[in-house]
Amino acid sequence: MQKGEKIMSENTAYTSSGRDGKYLRDMCDGWHFGGEALTDDEVTGIDFDDGGWEVVNIPHTWNIKDAEDGGNDYLRTAFWYRKRLDYDEAFDGKKVYLEFNGSNQKTDLYVNGTHVPYNGGDAFTHKGGYTAFRFDVTDYLVHGQNVLAVRVDNSHDEAVAPISADFNMCGGIYRRVYLVVVDKVHFDLNNNGSSGLFFTTPDVRSMTAPESLGTVIVRTELVNDSDITRVVTVKTAVEGDNAPEALSEQISVPAQGRVVYERTVKVADPHLWNGISYEREAAKICEEGRSAGKSDAGYMYTVKINISDGDKTLDEVSDRVGFRYFYVDREKGFFLNGKSHPLRGVNRHQFYKGMGNALTEAEHEADVAIIKELGANAVRLCHYPHTDYFYDLCDENGIVLWTEIPLVNALGESAEFVENTKRQLVELMRQQYNRPSVIFWGLQNEIGNGANSASSFMNAKQLVYELDELAHGEDSSGRYTTQAINRDYAMNQKGTADYADFTNNIGWKSDIAAWNIYPGWYPDKNFDGNFEQLMDRKASFDNRPMGISEYGWGANVNQHELYPELEKNGLLAWGQWHPEEYQSIMHEQALKYINTHECLWATFIWVLFDFAVDSRNEGGQIALNDKGLVTCDRKIRKDSFYLYKADWNKADRFVHITSSRYVDRESEDTYVKVYSNCDKVELYVNGVSVGEMERRGNGVFMVNKVRLINGMNEIKAVGHIGADNTEYTDICKWRLG
């Protein structure tokens, strides 16, 4: 079994080999949940009666309902999870770890009433809700029955990022839990929640193929927790096209010591990780006359490292590596493997309606399928590390990732906050270090929103500087650091020289930058020209390559207006009127701008899916950020979804009539607008052709002055591709009177 298989999906890059070597036990079922406000002494004891508590399975959150009902009052507190573990003879002479893949936001473990430190150190509380971590429980287990008590706390903490955010921080053990059992000679499991195995493909930041292409530097540490020196065999093998011969050698590991293992492996003429291209997929379909099947866009090699003693496997770790090189040019945008590869992507939160953040593999798979249907080739994982399985899926499908730490909006004032933020960055980078899909390390999002003085701005600037230095120290391969900025403050007067330097030159250190801009929503009252004006202004004082990290507009699929005005019933952004048509019109204008500015290294729509925000009440829907292209239950694709599909996805032909949900009409005169990636579209009204629709560019087709009759009207659009006789059809019905 290797990383990527379902049971191993959550940050578990191990090979299971039964009683020999490392193996996992799923620990997700049958936890007793409760104990709000109870103390450690009350809950952690072996004899504590939790029989009246709710029995839950992991993933779990206690905020499913109250974080989706509005009022900004979802429960932020501490609860307990308890589970009994029978001692297994397989534990004898082994090391045993309890691995959490995500628990929000602070987590403590007690075994048989004893507080256990995490990561093999002196700290007991893991602070941070979005990365994996482990507890070494070897010395705390007893023969017979053991009691595990886990305290999880999502209450507000000024020392732990995020301390302010426009999303719900649902509490609970919301990602998988495993018991990891391994020989006393093993690969390091106390390295910030990572597998302990790191691949570096050097010099990847290049416009042309580097001389090192196909080179992978394999690095890990062998740990000997026994009292005698052990001489073991270490074997490194690569699987894939043109894979080299395996390396095998004997290594002596001292008693209670460790040895750094670093070797360089070279794959001749490597098969590249090329990233997904829908144009390429469309060409395959056209050439083959059928579905192209699974793309090789995410081609990877598997690297396995094995520790053995004679015929006995002590430990084995495996992971995948993808060979690629990339470059961001200020004038020409993003290049992958020497070719222009414009990154057109989406932002994604880990949320499903009725599930909160407690998702299973099925939800992640469904989301990736929708991303591919849309035609996006990049995802920004906002505003925190996502589950390991989602990274797996992006690796496999050739989807480029911007991943980031939860440094959002507000900045903590304490030294503890700074250190915790740095630790969260280290955990993210070490856990996702091997990912070919990860090309951008995000350092912050809109932290200026939480800074209200010149000094706090300078503190933020300093922290970002330190995070950038830390990121480049952790990753020497050439990946980019970036950040999402929403304000330039150029006209603000704070009266200090440092602040003037900040406002004029940004000074927030990262390799590249991107901007969150919402013209026609907030704060700007109109769109026309504002996209260009905003980006031109930002380019004038920042010489880094520029991207757009967020842009979008809200839409309620039950609200409709053919000619929407920005200010209707108050400012649209915060008002109760969010017609679906307004979102579509704005995205049409945004797409026109994006398609004529190749200098943008990436653009990310905010957001792919609606998501719950308990503090919101707008657009006729409570507790919801409605800027998604898809509803939060994934059941409805809004009109704007099909706009981007028409422009981005050339492999999946379709026709979509906009405003189809606007069934009851007041006026006999209307327009009909269609989004399609077909070459031409013909319109039929009540069975009568009104001719070929006018192409407006970027997949938009229009017919003005269509007249409806009293009663029910049938609107049909038929698309064609070249000389192909296949018809692509969409039909809707509108009622007049």
Image (cartoon, helix red, strand yellow):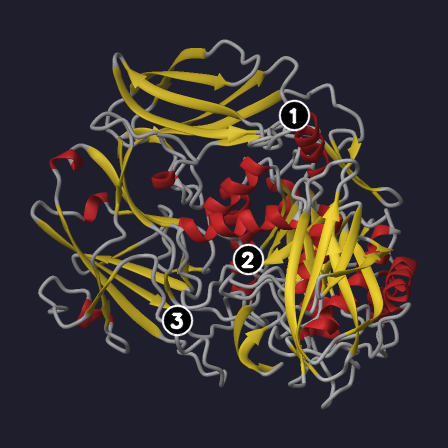
Disc 2: CA contacts within 10 A as few (<14), some (14-19) or many (>=20): many
Task: Tell me if residue 129 can be seen.
Answer: yes
Residue at the outermost front position: 688
At label 2, which amino acid type do we have?
Answer: Tyr
Residue 74: image location, x then y, percent: 43, 79
Above or below, comparing residue 21 to residue 96 in the picture? above
Residue found at x 39% / y 50%:
133
Q: Which residue is mark 2?
A: 384
Task: Assign a secondary structure to mark 2.
Answer: loop
Callout 2 touching callout 1 (CB < 8 Å): no
Q: Which mark is residue 64?
A: 3
Residue found at x 67% / y 29%:
284
Gap in angstroms between the C-alphas marked 3 and 2: 19 Å
Residue at the outermost bottom position: 569
Q: Which residue is mark 1?
A: 288
159 left or right of 80 in image: right
Which picture quadrant has residue 640? bottom right
Nearer to us of marks 3 and 2 is 3
199 left or right of 714 in image: left
Which picture quadrant has residue 229? top left
